Image (spheres, rainbow, N blue to C red):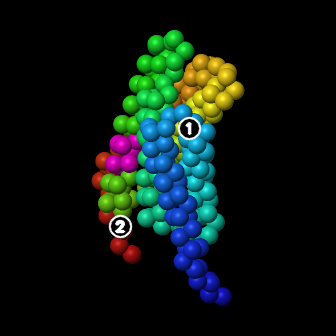
């Protein structure tokens, strides 16, 4: 029995969710820079961007609509979300509990992660050019989960402090820094594996 042809909307559903996440990431950054007091909206947009990363891959695999274009758009959305949001948080909402060492550590980790994300995306582009498998490895998935986790707790604690007059971020900042350290470790490990794989000469295909 021939497979039923999917309509345009179903065929592009995962990509549409990815674009929604991309728009949310850019909007989050604009709101954070222009209206830093609107923390609730920054949190909502962060949740939308994070959920889009979870949903687009699930839907693409479930409906068998995964494409190289969709994978690349997913990576672009992830990098923009992580780099812009972490940069915004470190610049606009940095830890301010009197612990200068913690603040400096967090800001340094954010800079290192942004640089690492750019390098990782460069290997993705190179892998596409070489027609290699550019699917995210286990290290990359752990890294991405850790980054989303750190961003989510950072934003949630900021909202709790603002709207409930608490001081939770003074303590959450330690958790955020710890998760960022772990994310950088797994990201650097995954990047090293990519570099090692791409540096090896490809073996010619055997003749049948």
Q: Which residues are magenta?
A: 117-123
Per the image, the residue denoted by label 2 is: 205
The N terminus, quarter of image: bottom right
Q: Nearer the viewer, residue 206 or 32?
A: 32
Q: Nearer the viewer, residue 112 or 102?
A: 102
Task: Work out whether mark 2 precedes mark 1 in sequence or the reverse, and give the earlier one.
Answer: 1
Q: Residue at x 59, y 73 (%)?
A: 10
Disc 2 and disc 1 in contact, CB within 8 angstroms: no
Q: For the residue carrying disc 2, how many other residues have a C-alpha within 10 Å: few (<14), some (14-19), or many (20+)?
A: few
Per the image, the residue denoted by label 1 is: 38
Q: Which mark is drawn over residue 208? A: none
Q: Quadrant of residue 125?
A: bottom left
Residue 24 in the figure: left or right of residue 69? right
Q: Residue at x 55, y 49 (%)?
A: 49
Residue 203: x %, y % from top left: 33, 59
Cα–Cα span, label 2 and label 1: 57 Å
Residue 30: x %, y % from top left: 45, 44
Outermost residue toward the right? Answer: 164
Q: Main secondary structure of the magenta part?
A: helix
Q: Nearer the viewer, residue 115 or 134?
A: 115
Q: Residue at x 52, y 18 (%)?
A: 96
Residue 26: x %, y % from top left: 45, 48
């Amino acid at each position: 029995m021939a497979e039923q042809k999917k309509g345009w909307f179903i065929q592009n559903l995962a990509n549409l969710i990815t674009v929604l996440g991309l728009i949310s990431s850019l909007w989050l950054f604009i709101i954070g820079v222009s209206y830093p007091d609107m923390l609730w909206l920054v949190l909502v947009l962060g949740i939308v961007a994070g959920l889009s990363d979870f949903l687009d891959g699930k839907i693409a695999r479930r409906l068998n609509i995964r494409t190289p274009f969709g994978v690349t758009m997913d990576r672009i959305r992830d990098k923009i979300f992580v780099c812009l949001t972490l940069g915004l948080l470190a610049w606009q909402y940095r830890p301010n509990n009197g612990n200068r060492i913690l603040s400096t550590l967090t800001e340094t980790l954010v800079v290192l992660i942004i640089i690492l994300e750019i390098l990782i995306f460069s290997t993705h582009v190179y892998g596409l050019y070489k027609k290699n498998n550019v699917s995210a490895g286990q290290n990359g998935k752990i890294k991405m989960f850790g980054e989303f986790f750190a961003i989510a707790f950072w934003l949630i604690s900021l909202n709790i402090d603002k709207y409930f007059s608490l001081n939770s971020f003074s303590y959450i900042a330690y958790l955020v820094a710890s998760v960022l350290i772990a994310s950088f470790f797994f990201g650097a490990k995954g990047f090293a594996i990519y570099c090692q794989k791409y540096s090896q000469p490809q073996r010619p295909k055997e003749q049948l």
